[in-house]
Image: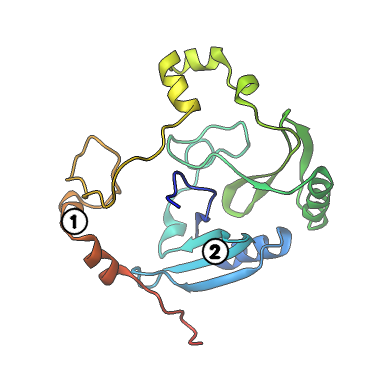
Amino acid sequence: MRVQQPNGIHHIAIMSADMKAQLTFFTQVMGFPLKGLFEMHGVPGGKHAFLEMGPESYFSVVELAGIDEIPSTIGITHAGTGAGKCAKGTMQHIAFRVPDPEGLIAMRDRIRSHGIPAIGPIGHGFCRSIYFAGPEGLTLEVSCQVAELDAAHWVDPRMLAECGISGEEAEAMLNPPPCTVQSPVSQPAFNPSVPNLAYPPEALKHILATPDEAITKQGSYDEPPVPA
């Protein structure tokens, strides 16, 4: 069956200057088992960790040399709270999922048992949430769904207007069209007016001009660091 859209998050990756502190927090406080820790593929000296949140869903940590020298500032690089500001395009907060309100309270108590304050639960109509902080300035949340997120009630016409979204544009957002393109689609040429990965322009042009098969062959790391 042809996939029409992503069906979840495979992994969220955060940058760290202290891999051990992040792994300790997310294994012991959050309960995510460590599933991978290896030299980051294609980045000699980098560290890359994967912690399991659920089936085929992971929390990932990346540590690179020199990260501790980059300033971390609430209001710029980090929001600090669920209502805080940070630079555009950066992660404002992460909300993890539990299946029910009982699980939410259990998670709150688990977090508090490690001496970490956890605020809530707070109701949001379709979900309930608790709020807390993680290492290195992370703003975190755990939520459980309590009702259907029905667009008819939760897409506010006033907010659409404030965002400059017309009725026609809103209809397209509420009902995204199916994917009808025929595979394979050729790689677009370099265009600085569209979102691009932040490689140097000449390097990016070279990557975009390289056939997909060559990219896969040259860039893949399929063998685990510990042989079977």
- Tell me whether circle 2 and circle 1 mark residues in contact (CB < 8 Å): no
Q: Which of marks 2 and 1 is nearer the N terminus?
A: 2
Q: Is residue 215 left or right of residue 149?
A: left
* Disc 2: which residue: 18
Crowding at label 2, few (<14), some or many (≥20) Cα neighbours within 10 Å?
some
What kind of element bears circle 1? helix
Q: Is residue 97 left or right of residue 18?
A: right
Q: How far apart are marks 2 and 1 (CA)?
A: 30 Å
Q: In this view, does 125 lie to the left or right of 157?
A: right
What kind of element bears circle 2? loop
What residue is at 34 percent from the left and 40 percent from the top?
A: 180
* Disc 1: which residue: 203
Residue 132 x, y percent position in the rendering: 70, 45
Crowding at label 1, few (<14), some or many (≥20) Cα neighbours within 10 Å?
few
Residue 196 x, y percent position in the rendering: 28, 44
Picture quadrant of residue 34: bottom right
Amino acid carrying mark 1 in the image: Ala
Q: Nearer the viewer, mark 2 or mark 1?
A: 1
Picture quadrant of residue 129: top right
